[in-house]
């Protein structure tokens, strides 16, 4: 029994010693940042030497394409559609008759009003003769004249209503799908079709407020649309006079020719807006930028150690970004391993 107890005791002591050894070993590893030779580990990273260059400052933006002119075709009067004078999806000219609403009742009212006008005109003529002979008072003549003028106004009102029964195109363009047929009872609330002028198109987009002073009317820009690699050109013709407070952006509108009809209103446009060309600009790879709470920073190598630099940036492209402040010519910028490195870490830089 004693031998058995001695064996158990030796096993427990050995197991405890093994656990204590592993804990001490792990603690030494965590506390010792140095290698076996007692020196700091050096990480090898890639980098570039900062230099200045001429930068064609192009701003990439998203915009929307709109028709130059568009309107919803509706009737101003209620009635039965008598005729439709356009084909769906066809081009129409300014002033062309699109559809006609039945006006028989209005024409009957016009005939009645003309009869009343004739009688009122004769009464006014007679009253004028009697007034000259002092047979009636000035007040009685004024009443007769007012009746005549009222009859004239009634005719003009009915004629205006009759004119509204003929709906014409306010401008040249392409008419869309119609929602009526001959015999439809139409009201002003019923949308008949849309008329769109797409010979020219508007491109509307917004730019950050810091670029507001660099955009001017009559400036040219280029844009592409989804599903096509073809580049189109447009000219800025209008700029909103104020910055939108909610988005801190300035709205701009350009116009482009679309005689071949390839572009359609309602699509998105990828806009390339040329800004001022910057000489002696510092442009760095996008992967070198590290977003932080107070802005953006980069890492540089200073005497073999990592140094953090806060930077102010501007235009960004797919592969590079323009730096306005923070870096200077000759700095060795780190481009790899930037998320794992810390201040004062030792690095060896392979300059590209």
Image: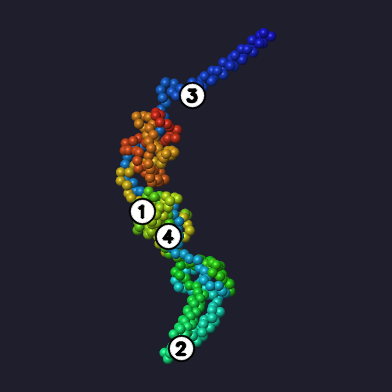
Q: Picture coordinates of residue 286 (x, y %)?
A: 41, 41
Please identify the quadrant where the C terminus is shown: top left
Residue 224 coordinates in the image, percent (x, y): 43, 54
* Contact check, label 2 and label 3, Cβ < 8 Å: no
Residue found at the very far right of the displayed protein: 1
Counting residues from the N terminus, which is met first, the one under dot 1 or under dot 3? 3
Q: Position of residue 56 (x, y in %)?
A: 34, 48
Camera-near label (1 vs 4) is: 1
Residue nearer the viewer, 114 or 92: 114
Q: Which residue is under mark 4?
A: 202
Residue at 44%, 71% in the rendered image: 94
Q: Secondary structure at mark 2?
A: loop
| Inter-mark Cα distance, 2 to 3 | 122 Å
Q: Work out whether 270 lies above or below 3.
A: below
Residue 199 sits in quarter: bottom left
Q: Are marks 4 and 3 in contact (CB under 8 Å)?
A: no
Numbered circle sitting on residue 30? 3
- Pick whichever of labels 1 and 4 is earlier in the sequence: 4
Question: Disc 2 designates what residue?
Answer: 136
Q: Are marks 4 and 2 in contact (CB under 8 Å)?
A: no
From the image, tell me which residue sits under label 1.
215
Which quarter of the figure has residue 235? bottom left
Is residue 33 visible in the rendered image? The answer is: yes
Q: Is residue 248 above or below residue 140?
A: above
């Amino acid at each position: 029994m004693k031998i058995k107890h001695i064996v158990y005791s030796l096993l427990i002591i050995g197991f405890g010693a093994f656990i204590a050894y592993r804990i001490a070993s792990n603690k030494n590893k965590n506390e010792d940042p140095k290698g076996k030779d007692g020196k700091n580990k050096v990480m090898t990273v890639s980098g570039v030497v900062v230099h200045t260059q001429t930068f064609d400052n192009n701003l990439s933006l998203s915009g929307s394409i709109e028709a130059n002119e568009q309107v919803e075709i509706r009737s101003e009067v209620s009635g039965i559609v008598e005729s439709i004078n356009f084909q769906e999806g066809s081009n129409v000219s300014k002033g062309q008759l699109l559809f006609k609403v039945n006006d028989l009742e209005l024409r009957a009212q016009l005939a009645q009003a003309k009869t009343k006008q004739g009688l009122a005109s004769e009464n006014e003529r007679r009253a004028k003769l009697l007034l000259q002979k002092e047979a009636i008072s000035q007040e009685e003549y004024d009443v007769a004249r007012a009746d005549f003028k009222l009859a004239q106004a009634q005719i003009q009102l009915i004629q205006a209503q009759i004119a509204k029964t003929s709906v014409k195109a306010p401008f040249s363009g392409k008419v869309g799908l119609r929602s009526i047929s001959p015999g439809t009872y139409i009201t002003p609330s019923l949308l008949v079709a849309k008329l769109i002028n797409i010979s020219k198109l508007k491109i509307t987009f917004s730019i950050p407020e810091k670029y507001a002073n660099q955009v001017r009317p009559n400036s040219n820009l280029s844009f592409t649309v989804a599903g096509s690699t073809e580049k189109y050109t447009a000219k800025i013709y209008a700029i909103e006079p104020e910055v939108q407070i909610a988005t801190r952006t300035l709205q701009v509108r350009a116009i482009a020719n679309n005689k071949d009809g390839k572009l359609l209103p309602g699509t998105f446009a990828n806009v390339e807006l040329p800004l001022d060309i910057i000489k002696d600009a510092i442009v760095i790879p996008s992967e070198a930028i590290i977003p932080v709470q107070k802005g953006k920073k980069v890492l540089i190598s200073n005497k073999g150690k990592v140094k953090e630099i806060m930077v102010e940036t501007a235009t960004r492209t797919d592969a590079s970004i323009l730096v306005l402040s923070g870096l200077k010519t000759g700095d060795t910028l780190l481009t790899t391993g930037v998320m794992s490195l810390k201040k004062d870490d030792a690095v060896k830089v392979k300059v590209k």
